[in-house]
Amino acid sequence: QADDEQLVLGARQFLTNFHPLVQVNNTKRNLINFSLRPLTAFYLDGNNVCVLCEELPTVENGGAKIVENADGSKGMEVTFKFKEGLSWGDGTPVTSDDVVFTWEMANDPNIGFSNYNPWTRASDVEVIDERTFVIHLPEVMQSYNSWDQVIPAHLERPIYEANKDLESYTRQTLYNREPDNPGLWNGSYVLSDYAVGQRVGFGVNPHWPGKTPDIERIVVSYRDNSSALLQAVLADEIETIVVSPGGISFEQMLELRKQHPDRFQFFVRDGTNLERIAVNLDNPALADLKVRQALMHGIDRQAITDALFEGLQAAAHTFESPVSPYYNPDVRKYEFDPEKAKQLLAEADWTPGPDGICVNDNGDRLSFEFVTTAGNTTREQLALVIQSQLKDICVETQNKFVGLQEYNGEYARKRGFSGMILSSIQFSPSTSPRIALGSDAIPTEENAWVGNNFSGYASEHMDEAVAGFEQSLEETEKAKYSGQVQEIFAEDLPMLPLYFYAAAYVAIPQVGNFNSTPFDVNAIWAEEWTLN
Amino acid sequence: MSVATPALEVVGAGHVAQPDRPRLLRVSSLSVSFPGAEGRESEVVSELSYEIAQGETLGVVGESGCGKTMTSLAIMGLLPSGAKVSGSIEFDGKDLTAFSPRQWRNHRGREVAMVFQEPMTAMNPVMKVGQQIAEVLVKHERLSKRAAFGRAVELLASVHIPSPERRAQDYPHQLSGGMRQRAMIAMALACRPKLLVADEPTTALDVTVQAQILDLMLELQDTYGTAIQFISHNLAVVSEVAHQLMVMYSGRIVEYAPAEDLFANPLHPYTQGLIRTLPDIAQPMAELYTIPGSVGGKRPSGCRFSNRCPLADARCREAEPALREVTLSHHVACFKVN
Amino acid sequence: MSAIDTGLAGIPSAPRQTIWQLRRKRFLRNKPAVIALAILVTLTALCVLAYPYSLLMGLDPNETNLLMRFRPPTATHWLGTDSLGRDVLLRLMYGGQVSIAVGVLGTLLTALIGILIGVWAGFLGGKVDAFLMRLTDVVIALPMTPVLIVLGAVDLSKLGLSQALASSPGVVFLRIVVIIALVDWTTIARITRAATIEVRQREYVKAATVSGARHLYNVLVHVLPNITTPITVAATLSVGRIILFESTLSFLGFGIVPPTPSWGNMLTNAQELIISAPALAVYPGLLIFLTVISVNFVGDGIRIAFDPRSEK
Amino acid sequence: MNALVEVDNLNLHFPIDDGFFKEKLTLRALTDVSFSVEEDETLAIVGESGSGKTTLGYTISGLLTPTSGRIKFGAALGGHSQKRPVQLVFQDPFSALDPRMMVGDIVAEPLRLQGVSRAERLQQADDVLEQVGLPAESARRYPHEFSGGQRQRIAIARALIAKPKLIVADEPLSALDVSIQSQILNLLNKIKRDRTISYLFISHDLGVVHHLADRVIVLYLGRIMEIASRQDLFATPSHPYTQALLESVPRIGRGRRKPGQALKGEIPTPLSPPPGCVFHTRCPRAQEVCRRQIPELLPAPGRPEQLSACHFKD
Amino acid sequence: MLRYTFFRLVQAAFVLLVMTFLLFMLIGMMPGDPVENMLEGNPALTPELARQMRELYGVGVPLPVRYWHWLTAAFQGDFGFSSLYFRPVLEILGPALLQTLKLMVATIVLSIPLSLLLGAIAALRPGGWMDTAISFFAFASISLPNFWLSLILIIVFAVQFGWLPASGTPLADNPSLGLQIYHSILPVTVLTMFFVGPLLRYVRASMIETMSSDYIRTARAKGLSETTVIVKHALRNALIPMVTVLALGFGMLFSGALVVETIFGILGMGKMIFDAIRYVDFNLALIGLLLATIVTLVSNLLADLAYAWLDPRITLK
Ligand SMILES: Nc1ncnc2c1ncn2[C@@H]1O[C@H](COP(=O)(O)OP(=O)(O)OP(=O)(O)O)[C@@H](O)[C@H]1O
Ligand SMILES: Nc1ncnc2c1ncn2[C@@H]1O[C@H](COP(=O)(O)OP(=O)(O)OP(=O)(O)O)[C@@H](O)[C@H]1O
Ligand SMILES: [Mg+2]
Ligand SMILES: [Mg+2]
């Protein structure tokens, strides 16, 4: 059975590169956070907490202040202080200079940092002393106290100075050349060894000022397909695994639980990642709100999660998950009601045709292309079930399972789908709903296809509410604006919410304190994990 | 030309037929059959009886498929698996039919050796010629590999292969057809066998080379006193080397006599036909004699030649004539011969 | 009649059995091949019956039913249902149609390309031959599966096909057939070439040439009919190989796209749940195995039956 | 007599492709061959294996294109509409017939290539089959049902059907049993009696050649050693090679042979034929001049019709 | 011989050049671009950054132009960076190639004696029950989908019995040889199963043919023992052509390795290429495919040389 000192995690996709702030995606965040910690993170309860800092600055405690900018607009000053004794893995202390360096690089357009809580939000970083620094923000923003990782100036600055463009910097940075250099990391673990595509190993960081980790070594082992991962779990080769597209599927977890209820622990928590159908609002049929409402009434979301996920993934009514502090339970809900759906369609002039599919007066059929990623069994099943359900309310979907590449590129980001597309989107407490609902988040050629507003939804109402949210500093106010956004969302249905992915893990029983949080990467608290 | 045969002693034998020489091989009532389709057996050699004296050449002639090769393979104990043999083969006083596989292996290559028709395919293409010869010596004379190779070179010299040292290092494909056949003969004679079975050794060769090989065989027979069973379908070739002659037709001996006797006085209608069908340089004629029909097809009942025989009558179609001695040492299997 | 004897003793009065009768007899003597053929015929017949069967049982291969997932065999669902409550047997039947169709069509295309190139190279010889054989060598040197994946990933719309057409099931099916043929023709090409070279130098071709026959005549009249044996054998074996290819491609996510079932993608879909519902993986895997091994046995049987050495 | 075919200084070299960088080797299969085939005559070509007999036959029938030299078809062939006045009969009766075609179609193939209708050509095929001594119903059988001798008859029938003026027969007997050989020989003779036809008869069996030929060409390493009428050649062979050949032929009635008369050595490779007279390496009469100078093909002393290429001919 | 080798190498180089072009075009026609993949779901993505990245990966530049850039760089020894692993492609592919070669060599080392033994046994009595059994085994080997076999073997040996590891590579940093072998047992078994069938059929056919050849009869006529006849005369002749079959099989093995590597989590060439294609890592896919092709081309060349060395009848020109 399990090795006392080592915990093996399973994962599917290896890192593209090891740089913590370049080309960041979820896979990378899940891994890097073992050894490189962000300044702040959202803990289990959804509250923002300090990771590297002494105390979280807030407006209430005076750590953050609203100030007047030179041009008269409002800005902010946020003061942070690193924890006592915080050091890089090579013993060099983590200092304010590292923050300045990180911020400098982030503001160099040639380098291309793309972290989740970007340093580019700051207009200046002011060094108070070795451990204390003030971040200046040019405007008031709700995410003023959410900040990502810093990188070691003593190692990376010379490299940056010598390579001032993305191409040569990403090639030369120690994160890619020597990722096992302990000086690059400041977490409770340091990345100690790796084999490209196969495994990444983490060892204890002797300079970590916080709790000394209980587990001496954490290995992330990569397996390409979920069956192989599952077999490896069953063969005791992998001890902990995430349930998501990056690990085994939810259904596999359910099966595992059925087969071996006692061999493993199963952590399942409501998550914040929303599975939704983006509808192309350029399609005249879908542009009609009644049709979208009919679709919502026609899809039995509860039955789907009951049948496919044993009810463990919550059916969604809005984009915020019930676990979110901003969740608004009072928005309009669309219960499964095929009769209502048909009635709505009839109101929109769609009546059943000879083959059971609705037609309008022009003779158009109510038929949509429905795009899904091929190879993702859960999604494929979902698409097939929805197809069956919509057929009952006289809507036809033509399923199209396309490869990941095509899906991401041609279909989603370039909005190449003419009807509906199945995709997921995650809102962490610090992210603004703008990314999927803002009228400036519609991917177009001009903005280099950036943005997740695949539906092409634009509403002034919504934009205002979103801006309100972004500028709120207090939780109650944030909740108010977010609630507003959710209401508009439920009325307008810019996308069809289906359910929230649960944050789920499977682990051997020996693992303790495995606190999985739906809000942030649980590797950030890896030192709390135990193994006995 | 001087023949370099230092290692070989000369036994000496004239090339005149000597019927009183001691008997070496005695084959009696040899039959070979194969299990055919649908359980029928096909007999390819039937009731063969003949003898070979020491140092004597027996020529065997017959058309394709008459069982010449099967007869010689039976003597070598090399019949393909599935073949059924009956009758007895007595060699130098030993009964070969009672031999164990081990005895056969000690017998083959030492007491009897064989030369095949196609020298190209009969030699292992990826083994040096010298080695292939040496192999026999290693097996039967228990020589070391090196010594055996030395002997192989001498043997190549004795079959008149120029620069034998170099040739011994060659592979079969590097030799011309004639040279390959010489090497085959050298291989066969390596252990000075008492009997050499030569199955159409010159058929694949040009006339000029054929003449050379025939010369060589006669010369070696003189030197070593080896008896030879010489198989050919060419009467003329056999006539140049054989003391005794055996004509086969469809698995049977039809005529068996001393060579000169047979050519001077062929008795069996088939033998007569064979001789008469040959165009002759000495005696041109407008129309050649032909034996009607062809070999193969269904065997007739009675005499196997009856369906092609100009003399055949009802009796020939009923019973098979036995081989009998008509005049001294002249055997024939025909009812029409007295 | 003239003085010449005709030597007709050998000709029997009644015509002997034709070459095909002989071959059939020899094939029928080969028990494993006959059994394999029976299996193949049965499997194919079963697959062809998919539609009537669905009418009879009132089933739809693509209709999902969340209340009927993973059902054990019942009177309506003889092999139970899959993860979406669809009838496994019916899907296996439809899947077999697709898999076998890929195998057969792929082989036809493969054979077409292979024969064209092989005959061309073999008959003309010289520089043409050298070039075509180098080409063959190169294609053989290509690592097959990765190349299939590249070809499978090529975006047809970048080749000018409309997005909708490019991802329609028919085009996806054809595309698989085509890409497999594009890399798999080499075996048949080489075999055809070798056989063509052998036939080309036969004397009946020379006789025809002397009488004024052109290349095309020789190829059509003499070469093609005489190289059917090795090609038939190679093509038979190729059916099995292509069915395997398709399943591998499906496994890697580049094959027939669901919901259209093929044995390959059914197997792939089932592998996630192989522990709890192993039957879903075992059935298609077994059918692939059974089909391919039967095809191989039949191919071998044909080879033996057609062997010129046993053909007097 | 008119010349049917005139061959003038024919050379045929096979390029041996020896990789990209190496100089190309040439195999001289035929060198400076000149002769003619007269109407209604049988011209035999003899020589050892590899001497170029088949190559010569193929060149004349148009299967090979000469490297240099000319082949001229005489006036007797001018009026024919057919493409080639020549037909071929091969050595191996097994590979000479397409196993997938019925005998009737095989025999009628030359007519098919001339565009004769099927009914018409099958009718003719039946006729020719009868002429070569096969029953007409053979036409509806496949070749594998026939014996070697019968197949050779079929091949001859195919050669005859287009009424050629010349048949090139490349060792048509050597694959057959002795008892069958004479049947085919007689058939060839009968055909010759029935129609005006010339044979280019390739053989290495001098007995057969003596029986059939009007004139004989002796080839050695692609060169003509001697051309003579049959009587002259067999009675007074002029070239030492011809003499050696005749000497080597085994004959019945001579009793056991006396060793030591056989020609020494073997035929050299045509890739690098010996300089001078190509035969000098094996010639018992070879002198210095033979190593240097190629002897011309000139009449033997006192026999203007008998040409031989030797510095010391008889 | 030297000249021949040189010529073949030149030829191979030319072939490779042509292939770079073809593959470049093919890969260029794959959908999507690497940037999509890297930035998927990242809310902090800015248009500016997206543009920059696309530029970095050459998206938008016409294919032939990109090819030309690539080619000139390649001639200067720069084969490009992997966008997936962010390392020079050769640095990634080197170890991967080694991994795959290890797998393949192990497979070949096992397959040759196995196929020889089984093939020879089958050939001794064609049609006998041993032959039938071995033929069945061979056909089964040819017909089993290898991914299916892999899964079944994992379920049986790793999951049910727990005797063998389900992963193809050990997790330790510097695994001992023993550990490496232990982890390779299942993947090598699958590959061997996949490879041995065709080989075995070939050995059998070749042996049957050889055993009926004239020179075997000659060898027997010399009085040699059956073992000598088989080992010294038959096997060698039967095996020479196998060199070519092996070389051709090499390409096939590469394909088989892809599937096996994917399932057993071995980072070999096959999986590298597969990943590269899935995640549109242009350079990696291209060089990976080329490298795989080079390996087969070289193995073919070696096979030809070995053939000529083993068979004196062949002279290489
Ligand atoms: N393995 C076998 N099984 C069945 N019949 C066989 C077998 N080998 C040979 N035969 C038959 O045995 C008969 C005699 O063959 P054999 O080889 O002895 O003839 P041959 O006189 O040597 O002919 P050739 O002059 O063609 O060499 C032939 O009819 C042949 O078909
Ligand atoms: N296509 C070819 N390419 C190269 N060399 C050839 C070719 N055909 C024949 N040769 C060579 O030309 C020479 C003459 O061959 P040819 O076949 O004409 O001889 P032949 O007298 O008919 O011999 P045989 O009696 O063996 O039939 C031989 O050395 C032969 O190897
Ligand atoms: Mg024989
Ligand atoms: Mg010839």
Image: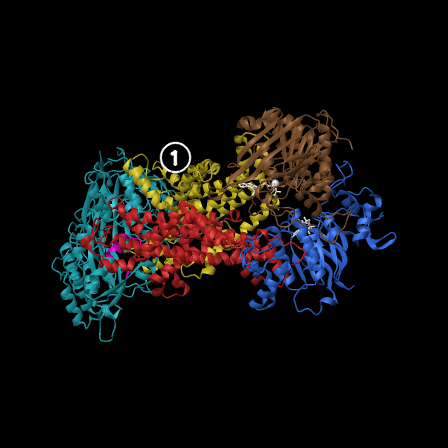
Chain colours: A cyan, B brown, C red, D blue, E yellow
Q: Is residue B68 left or right of residue D197?
A: left
Q: Can residue E288 be seen in this snapshot?
A: no
Q: Which residue sits furthest left? A: A330
Could you say where residue D259 lies in the image, as x and y percent from the top left? 76, 36
Q: Can residue E119 be seen in this snapshot?
A: yes
Establish whether ligand 1 lies closer than 8 Å to the Cβ of label 1.
no
Q: State the residue at coordinates (45%, 56%).
A: C110
Helix, strand, or loop for circle 1?
helix
Query: Quadrant for ligand 3?
Result: top right
Instruction: Judge whether residue D67 is colored magenta.
Output: no
Could you say where residue B332 lies in the image, as x and y percent from the top left? 66, 37
Examine the image and state in which quarter residue D266 appears: top right
| Chain name for mark 1 | E
Q: Nearer the viewer, residue A498 or B47?
A: B47
Could you say where residue D45 lies in the image, as x and y percent from the top left? 73, 53
Q: Nearer the viewer, residue B191 or B173?
A: B191
Q: Is residue D215 left or right of residue A121?
A: right
Q: Is residue E16 left or right of residue D157?
A: left
Please provide the residue range marked out in magenta: A370-382
Note whether C288 is above or below B90 in the view shown. Answer: below
Which amino acid is tagged 1? Answer: Ile
